[in-house]
Amino acid sequence: MRQKQFDPQTICTLKAQMVEKSAALQFSQFTETFATLGGLENLKEWTLNRFKNR
């Protein structure tokens, strides 16, 4: 808010800090994409098609 704009990285960091305060939850950031995941080709295709028009 100091910069008068939304910064996705800052928002993500703040959310991670909130989640980490809970003993029952853990925040993880993943770098995997569908291209780097092996197998489940039908599921990946269905997921991409399902959300393509949204």
Image (cartoon, grey):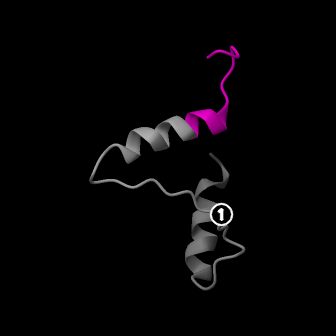
Q: Residue at x 60, y 85 (%)?
A: 39
Seen in the picture, residue 35 relative to 28 is either above or below; the reply is below
Q: Secondary structure at mark 1?
A: loop
Indicate yes or no whether the magenta region holds residue 47: no
Q: Position of residue 7 (x, y in %)?
A: 67, 30
Query: Left or right: 12 with respect to 24?
Result: right
Q: Residue furthest bottom?
A: 39
Residue 43 point in image, percent of width and height:
55, 75
Picture layout, residue 7 above or below residue 17: above
Identify the residue at horizontal 60%, vertical 72% (top origin). Answer: 44
Image position, residue 30 (x, y; %): 59, 62
The total number of labels drawn is 1
- Residue position marked by numbered label 1 in the rendering: 31
Q: Quadrant of residue 41?
A: bottom right
Residue found 63% across the figure and 84% down from its top: 38
Q: Residues within 10 Å of mark 1 (few under 14, many from 20)?
A: few
**Residue type at tag 1:** Thr
The quarter of the rendered structure image containing the C terminus is top right
Closest to the observer: 8 or 20? 20
Q: Look at the image and tell me in which quarter the N terminus lies.
A: top right
User: In front: 42, or 39?
Assistant: 39
Question: Is 4 included in the stretch rendered in magenta?
Answer: yes
Q: Reply above or below: 13 against 23.
A: above
- The residue lying at 60 percent from left, 54 percent from top is 51
| Magenta-drawn segment | 1-12
